[in-house]
Amino acid sequence: MTEMTPPPAGPAPGGSAPEPPFLSLHTTVVLLTALVVGLVLGGLTALTGAPIAGAVLAGLTSAGSSVPVLRSLIGGRSR
């Protein structure tokens, strides 16, 4: 029977620290919420019978303009 050995505990070989995340949790939540807002508003605009290009523009505009508002509403670091 083969015996499994656990991986070594401790820092990675070479002593390098783990890489920091690409985006912070706050930024990720704000951008994903803006994406959902843009998709919902674009979808609702398309359902009204507006041209698809107009619905896309409405979705993009709403997503872009919601980012600063969401950034201030969703709790980030206190400064």
Image (cartoon, helix red, strand yellow):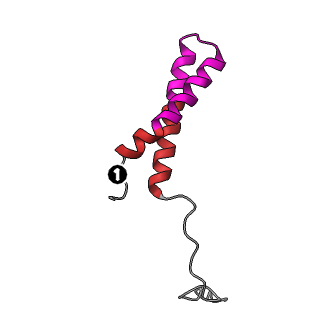
Instruction: Give the camera-side residue of 5 and 15.
Output: 15
Say whether residue 28 is left or right of residue 76: right
For residue 6, which quarter of the picture?
bottom right
43 over 14 or under it: above or below: above
Q: Give the range drawn in magenta.
A: 40-66
Q: Tell me which residue sits at (48%, 52%) in the image.
A: 27
Q: In which quarter of the image is the C terminus?
A: bottom left
Q: Which SS class for mark 1?
A: loop
Callout 1 amino acid: Gly
- Reading the image, the residue beneath label 1 is 75
Say whether residue 68 is left or right of residue 61: left
For residue 57, which quarter of the picture?
top right
Q: In which quarter of the image is the N terminus?
A: bottom right
Instruction: Give the camera-side residue of 69 and 51.
Output: 69
Q: Total number of numbered labels?
A: 1
Instruction: Give the camera-side residue of 64 and 25.
Output: 64
Q: Tell me which residue sits at (57%, 17%) in the image.
A: 46
43 over 12 or under it: above or below: above
Q: Tell me which residue sits at (50%, 51%) in the image.
A: 28
Q: Is-magenta flag for residue 56?
A: yes
Residue farthest toward the left in the current orientation of the protein: 78
Secondary structure mainly formed by the magenta segment:
helix
Q: Is-magenta flag for residue 57?
A: yes
Residue 29, percent from left and from top: 46, 49
Instruction: Give the camera-side residue of 65 and 10.
Output: 65
77 over 53 or under it: above or below: below
Q: Tell me which residue sits at (50%, 36%) in the image.
A: 36
34 over 78 or under it: above or below: above
